[in-house]
């Protein structure tokens, strides 16, 4: 029989009470937090997860299954992310991403069409050298998608002769 020393008690690895040995690790905390967001109505974050129908798949009710599916690609600085926010936490819909990428995959993320394809407003601001607030203000002012990335010198022409502004 194989034993490990844990908190002054001997734990038998062959019995059902021993599961994975990862209870005090970061992946285990991520897993428990994920389950609590979806299942605990008393938590403030439940309104954004469980109340909106986000669930954890049946396979991931056990940590060993979650870790078997998500072990590859895990890094100490990465966070778990659902690719599609309306789908549950499961292997096919989850990945490990940086905090920056995770912050850009939210329900309120603004997506815009650019010459290089559809991307988040923050990604477009970085790629095209704009301040994020500049693009946000243009989106809020209902600029046409093809005009969002105009250089600063052409803004005045657009604002002065816009067909969207009508006199009443």
Image (cartoon, rainbow, N blue to C red):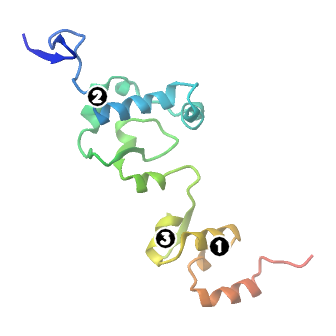
How many angstroms separate mark 1 from mark 2 (CA)?
Answer: 47 Å
The residue sitting at the front extreme is 8
Q: Which residue matches tag 2?
A: 24
Q: Residues within 10 Å of mark 1 (few under 14, many from 20)?
A: some
Secondary element type, mark 3: helix
Residue depicted at x 48% and y 39%: 87
Residue depicted at x 37% and y 45%: 79
Q: Please determine whether, in this image, residue 74 is positioned above or below residue 137.
A: above
Q: Quadrant of residue 19?
A: top left
Residue 55 percent location from the top left of the image = 48, 30
Q: Which residue matches tag 3?
A: 124
Residue 42 percent location from the top left of the image = 58, 25
Q: Is residue 5 left or right of residue 39?
A: left
Q: In front: mark 3 or mark 2? A: 2
How many angstroms separate mark 3 from mark 2 (CA)?
Answer: 39 Å
Q: Quadrant of residue 112?
A: bottom right
| Chain-order first, disc 3 or disc 2 | 2
């Amino acid at each position: 029989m194989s034993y490990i020393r844990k908190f002054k008690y001997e734990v038998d690895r062959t019995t059902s009470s021993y599961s994975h040995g990862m209870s005090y690790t970061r992946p285990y905390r991520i897993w428990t937090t994920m389950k609590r967001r979806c299942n605990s109505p008393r938590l403030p974050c439940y309104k954004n997860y469980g109340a909106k129908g986000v669930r954890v798949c049946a396979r991931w009710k056990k940590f060993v299954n979650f870790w078997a599916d998500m072990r590859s690609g895990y890094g100490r600085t990465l966070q778990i992310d659902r690719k599609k926010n309306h789908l549950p936490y499961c292997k096919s819909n989850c990945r490990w991403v940086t905090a920056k990428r995770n912050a850009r995959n939210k329900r309120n993320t603004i997506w815009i069409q650019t010459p290089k394809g559809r991307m988040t407003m923050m990604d477009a601001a970085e790629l095209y050298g704009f301040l994020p607030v500049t693009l946000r203000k243009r989106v809020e002012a209902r600029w046409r998608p093809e005009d969002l990335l105009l250089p600063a010198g052409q803004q005045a022409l657009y604002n002065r002769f816009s067909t969207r502004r009508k006199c009443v």
